[in-house]
Amino acid sequence: MTTDGRGRGGGRAFLGMPRARVGGGGRAAGEDRAAGDGRAAGDGRVAGRARAGGEDPAAFPPFPEAARAAVRDERLRANLRHATSTIRDKRARAVGELADWDRLRAAGKAVKDHTLRHLDHYLLQLEEAVTAAGGTVHWAADAAEACRVVTALVRATGEREVVKVKSMATQEIGLDEALEAAGVAAYETDLAELIVQLGRDRPSHILVPAIHRNRAEIRDLFRTEMGRWGRPAPADLDDTPAALAEAARLHLREKFLRAKVGISGANFMVAETGTLVVVESEGNGRMCLTLPETLISVVGIEKVVPTFRDLEIFLQTLPRSSTAERMNPYTTMWTGTTDGDGPSAFHLVLLDNGRTDTLADEVGRQALRCIRCSACLNVCPVYERAGGHAYGSVYPGPIGAVLTPQLRGTDSGIDASLPFASTLCGACYDVCPVAIDIPEVLVHLRERIVQGGPVTRGGVRVRIRPARGHAAERAAVRAARRLLDRPGALRAGERLLARARRLGFRPHRLPGPGRAWTETRDLPGAPAEPFRDWWARERGG
Amino acid sequence: MRVALFVTCVNDALYPATGVAVVRLLERLGVDVDFPAGQSCCGQPQYNTGYRYETEPLLRRTAAAFAGYPYVVTPSGSCAAMLREHYPRIGRRAAAEGRGSELAELADALAPRVYELTEFLVDVLGVTDVGAYFPHTVTYHPSCHGLRSLRLGDRPRRLLAAVKGLDLVELPQAEECCGFGGTFAVKNPDVSAAMGADKLRHARATGAEVLCGADNSCLTHLGGMLRRQDAPLRTLHIAEILAATQEEPAR
Ligand code: SF4
């Protein structure tokens, strides 16, 4: 079950590489057949915010439906507008300070692209370095496997509780729920994650998971829920930031000092040295990474960078893009284990869960460059109005719209609707510190949904059929193309339109898909004649 | 100087006045304008909705219609971006799919000759004062493709600022998308309408009489919402303002 790097043998392949062929380099891992024991999760659905083995896409409505409710939620809109516009302006200032921002951005992109191209090589180098430094590396092909590995590791310690550093990867695989099912309590220690956990809520932002909550809501949650998880909040708690932070600090301190097992993700893994890096702002991460006896880190395979020096780029671009800080407050780095200093046991669980399949797609793979700064969320006008929950995944906003349908596939209603959850305005691409052309990937994924096409699933190249529900649109586009490709027919159509409008045909409500237009907008007024006819008359063309 | 006008299908069918304005404006500036009749739709809405293959015949048609013209000028940032950015991409994808380099060659030959109107005026003709007269208060919404794909920057606002009689007022949060987004407007109508409403709130707060843009598709969305609001604000394409003179005022 646990596929320890050493004991892996047995014909098992990761990234499609039988052990013997590894090290050849020079070839994109994604171009090979990837591993896959199938994506089966199989767990029953757990009521609540997520489930062990990752979220069940079928539990979420399609994006437009979820967004409709969010748009009408005035409080949510106000919370989001305030939070995103503040951080947006700050980011712009922090980035504007650096004269070489464009070069840093290009360098970050280049390092990530290079690493992804030789991912097989760097992952094995990383495994070797971590192992040499006293850590143990485990490989998990999917969410269910990762949850099994971590649960078994925690069980082996005999502990019934763990403290957690905020991590997207563990949310992606539904680790908290898996641990809970195994009788292990997982305590989130990041302030915003704590708020989400206390509220039995779902995260709605990568960096600020409780961005949809305002201070008064948080105070109420602390007052009613903290006591159930540990030290209660003072009864007279008010909603000033200092009071809320102090309540959280006291509540969490108890957990830090007691916990024997810490669980984290990582922002970066350095292949050359085996060093893991966690970048955070509250110091809770530092506690979880240093105090427990056992540390388990679950990290997506795309988080590796070749050398320690590469961090120079990302430790400049990440804080400025995410929190608008010049330098990150708490940057914790560790390499395996050190006697008498920090955890005595360290396990690294390398998570695939759809990443190798994503890597096989030459347009879509750029999404794997993401360093989860959340700048794209903060500038996105659609995110600001729809909120994070509408994206039906732990990855909301523009990056979620391109990452989720690649990691999970496009079979469900929500996943097939995500690539359309954008106006393609390009603000996300502009701010992305690793230059992910999100609009390009969105259009590419739209293509996959409406036309069908080749994808890699579980390491196997398959052709998917066009999604249901686009048949009428497909027929209309085809008919329009035939019309548009024959200017004679086009002109006849334009004249017909002009004549109909002159005769007073100006519907206030359109039928079919046009109704969505006329719900809130009028149709444009009728021209007397198409431009072509004016030209022919006036310029004799 | 010989220029081919790519009027775009939306302007041809719904906003002929914008096309007429471009012709009058360019002719006033001494440009010899031609309208190649073989032109049609560039395929942008189809492409952006995911129908790349349906776009390919339109790429071929557009490339053929404008072959031989040193300049192709269009009064639409998003259609210019389609020809310049996405056509070469469509060509490369076709080549990568083993379908030959024909589309890529057509696209690459066309792309560098394509100019959005304000870009052509400022960069090629080198003018910012086009001799227009428009005695109204105007605020300008920079549409996303012009802003972020073409990097039009302050060209449109410089052109507007030089118009006699025109009082240009800044639009708060101008760079935020208006929520049109092609088929987004019908696939995600609630978010689209919410974004449009915010854009109009900002526009109305300026007190301007005219909300000007360089893309009639965005203006169709905003104008359609405005008409429901019965507001003392109307939308107008920048070409129609720049073409307006004392003798021939805009509509
Ligand atoms: S896609 Fe880019 S901007 Fe968005 S979170 Fe990832 S790195 Fe940041």
Image: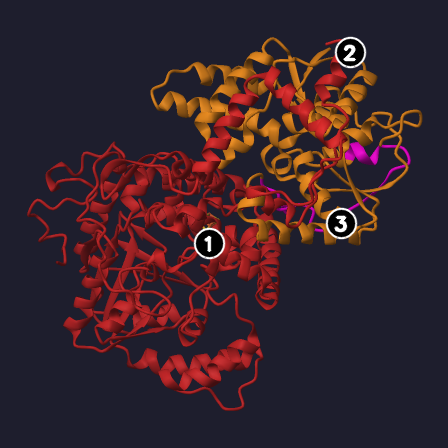
Work out whether residue A425 can be spotted: no
Q: Is residue A214 magenta?
A: no
The residue identified by callout 3 is: B203
Work out whether residue B138 can be spotted: yes
The amino acid marked with disc number 3 is Ala
- Circle 3 or circle 1, nearest the eye: 3
- The numbered dot on residue A539 is 2
The amino acid marked with disc number 2 is Arg
Residue B142 placement, left or right of A347: right
User: What is the span of residues highlighted in magenta in the rendered image?
Assistant: B158-181
Between the residue at mark 2 and the residue at mark 3, the CA separation in whole angstroms equals 37 Å
Mark 1, secondary structure of its residue: loop
Measured along the vertical axis of the image, is residue A16 above or below residue A85? above
Between the residue at mark 3 and the residue at mark 1, the CA separation in whole angstroms equals 32 Å
Residue A148 picture quarter: bottom left
Residue A425, image x and y in percent?
57, 42
Crowding around mark 1 (Cα neighbors within 10 Å: few <14, some 14 to 19, many 20+) is many
- The numbered dot on residue A405 is none
The amino acid marked with disc number 1 is Cys
Q: Which chain is red?
A: A
Disc 1 residue: CB within 8 Å of ligand 1:
yes
- The numbered dot on residue A373 is 1
Q: Is residue B165 magenta?
A: yes
